[in-house]
Amino acid sequence: MQTAEIRRRFLQHFEQRGHTVVPSASLVSPDPSLLFTVAGMVPFIPYLTGREPAPFPRATSVQKCVRTLDIEEVGKTTRHGTFFQMNGNFSFGDYFKEGAIQHAWELVTGSVADGGLGFDPDRIWVTVYLDDDEAADAWHRIAGLPVERIQRLGKKDNYWHTGADGPGGPCSEIYFDRGPEFGPDGGPLVDTAGDRFLEIWNLVFMQYELTDVRSKEDFRVVGELPKKNIDTGMGMERVAFLLQGVDNLYEIDEVAPVLRRGAELAGVTYGKDHDADVRLRVVADHVRSGLMLIGDGVTPGNEGRGYILRRLLRRAVRSMRLLGVDTATLPELLPVSRDAMSGSYPELATDFERIAAVAYAEEEAFRRTLSSGTALFDTAVREAKAAGTPALSGEQAFSLHDTYGFPIDVTLEMAAEQGVSVDEAGFRALMQQQRDRARADARAKRTGSVDVLAYRRLLAEHGPTDWRAYDTLRTDSRVLGLVTELDGEDGGPAGAGAGPGEVVRVVLDRTPFYAESGGQVADAGTLTWDGGRAEVLDVQRPVKGLVVHQVRVLEGALAGGAELTAEVDREWRLSACQAHSGTHVVHAALRQVLGPQALQSGSYNRPGYLRLDFAWQGALSTQQRADIEDVANAAVRADHRVRADYMTLPEAQAIGALALFGETYGEQVRVVEIGGPWSRELCGGTHVAGSAQIGTLALTGESSVGSGSRRVEAVVGLEGFRYLARERDLVRQLGELLKSPTDGLLDRVGGILSRLRDADREIAELRAQQTQAAAGSLAGQAHDVGGVAVVTASPPGLSGGDLRTLALDVRGRLGDRPGVVLLASESGGKVALVAALNPAAQERGLSANDVLRAAAAPVGGRGGGKADVAQGGGTDPGGIPAALQAGEQAVATAAGR
């Protein structure tokens, strides 16, 4: 039975039993504490924990998941995979244990002809919690399982909670007996390795309120929940390899095609060599995971989700290299994975052009990385072995990661191949320091170094802010609390208020101010009250639902409970709306000119200015930039209506609304349209009413922001007009300066540049002639130092390059006798130094590096090179005579050894 068919049967089974089919959430987790969705229940946590009311009494889903904690085990065992699918059914205060067991048994053992999975009932075993007689009795009555196939296990195996105070309860797991060839008889209680009795489904019965949760097994039950919930998880891949008659998840229909293609490319046979098999499994797993992550909008990077994706792709590429394939492999493997997965996820086929562009660019970047980074790695290994301590330091591993993008596991693998260890702890400490700095910066931006508890308490006491940014620029408001940066420890608000010149964070009951989000900066404006006024410097949402204003008091004293008027600067908001709507227009223009794969990956807009990052390979041509600007301005001139509507996420996706990859969305989303389907995006920002209000739109720049990603910048409205006016004035001034009409400027400047190039060539030729003449003269001045012909001189005004050319020319004129040339030249207050030795001098044991180091000190400089030529510089021209003398002394000392 194909995996897509298992998926269809699972969802149909529960839909027929009154469950709402919920589409898989993104792999990008809505939980800020998680990088990825790691379990099927993650999207339902707010309903299961009671934080939000469930919109349906029953639900079912097949959730995409990624876990990478045990990534090193991938390929080594039959059960470790980074991407997997979790089939689940959920009850929110509806049916409980009997219902969950009934539904599960009917699907697992139901005949294939009737829509079931067709497992043999006689090979099914279950476990329940030690004292869960209710579940054990239900399995016996409903499924007819004999008591000996209903085993009882403790909290470690059959109890679930979130790891924090809250709901929890016992669980019951369903196992399939694979047969005596896989392990001992006696059920899961005996087969602790889990090879024979394979767990396929876990039914969690959330029925208790837990407190004092200290570990998996250490907690206190304080009572029963008023509404009991069901959360189940069936491992799709495990069920698939059982129903497809293969030995592991790498050989199922959605994974094996990549494994087979990898084996073909490498010219190996799967199953013949253990090491090759492990590498092929790594490739098959990681290529699929990379495909799914890019499909959900993750792009390679050096932090967070981007780093995980980069690590997966690069491990796959390196595994293929270790199998002997040095050419690009993702163009061969990724389409195979697409074809295998699109039966379950058809969007992979429609979006493949974008997905492939990201993946192929990452492989190409890594291939370059391996070329440049491997040289640094090899040098570090040589130095480590020469030092007698074959270990790379944490700093060296971090440099490979930070500078060359080497994931630590690649460094570890390469080091192991060379018989060298790595200070992994030191590396991770440096990585943590880097992350801590980034997090501290982000936290300071959101909370102003205030303990977030201060905001949580205000939210708990007063409820969410009445946010009116879409409706008005002015509200009558009341101060609910003031928080200063000194108040974070105990979460207490400032009590004494704030006077003139003080900066404080203010929470109001209602506000018209837009809080920074979605790439749009916060509004500016004022708070005014009887006898006082404050300017709004920033607006943030440090916790969900609460809007916090950072203000500077200008007049009077601001205290908690004050009644005031909050007013947004009208011109600021208009310019901000122009910039945000301009961003949507530029995005639509990019997609119209370049194609649908030019998807936005990030943006920033402030009054009058916008920048937009998008997926694209290579710089835009001049014509492409012009076309994008023309399309955008045509949309502005057309004065398209701008409208915002609220709908469910599936409804938004159905009408083609674009979601910003990496963002998470709730049940209700806001869709902003400009010109109907021409520009339709999920967006929470503020916008103009019609596209003509955007005003002049001028592209000002285009650049790279990483592999496979470009950035365009633009100005709009008055800033756009001013930018074009400056360009006009510049052209006019150039015309006056060059005495040329504006339409003849290009020809005029081109002619000047041509004459300058001709002059540069003539100067270079004259300089070469002078150098040649000087070389002959200097070679004739060579004097003997310990049997070595030495030339020292300080020709003035030569650059480092010219001085090197002269030194090499002089060296070539010294013949076969040992010869050393040391030249120094002052130019612009700086000193250039070059030392050059011929082979005969090197045979005498002399080194250009030694000569240069001796000469560099008197001019306050440094340098280096090879034994035959070394080059450096200094900052003290007055030390040149001493430098030449020191260099000559170094020759004398070395020649006299």
Image: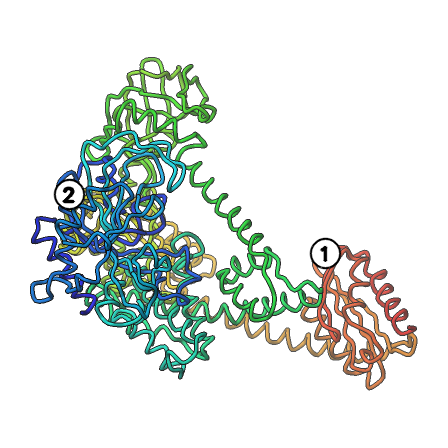
Q: Is residue 684 visible?
A: yes
Split into 4 quadrants, where in the image is the N terminus?
A: bottom left
Q: CA distance from mark 1 to mark 2?
A: 67 Å
- Pointer 1 residue: 829
Residue found at x 25% / y 56%: 86
Instruction: Report the front residue among 207 and 261.
Output: 207
In percent of width and height, residue 647 lies at 14, 45
In percent of width and height, residue 78 lies at 35, 66
- Pointer 2 residue: 646
Q: Amino acid at mark 1?
A: Gly
Q: Nearer the viewer, mark 1 or mark 2?
A: 2
The numbered mark, 1 or 2, whose residue comes first in the sequence reads: 2
Q: Quadrant of residue 739?
A: bottom left
Instruction: Report the front residue among 424 and 314.
Output: 424
Secondary structure found at label 2: strand
Split into 4 quadrants, where in the image is the C terminus?
A: bottom right
- Horizontally, is 677 left or right of 795 in the view? left
Q: Residues within 10 Å of mark 1 (few under 14, many from 20)?
A: few
Instruction: Report the front residue among 790 and 263.
Output: 263
In percent of width and height, residue 435 lies at 48, 47
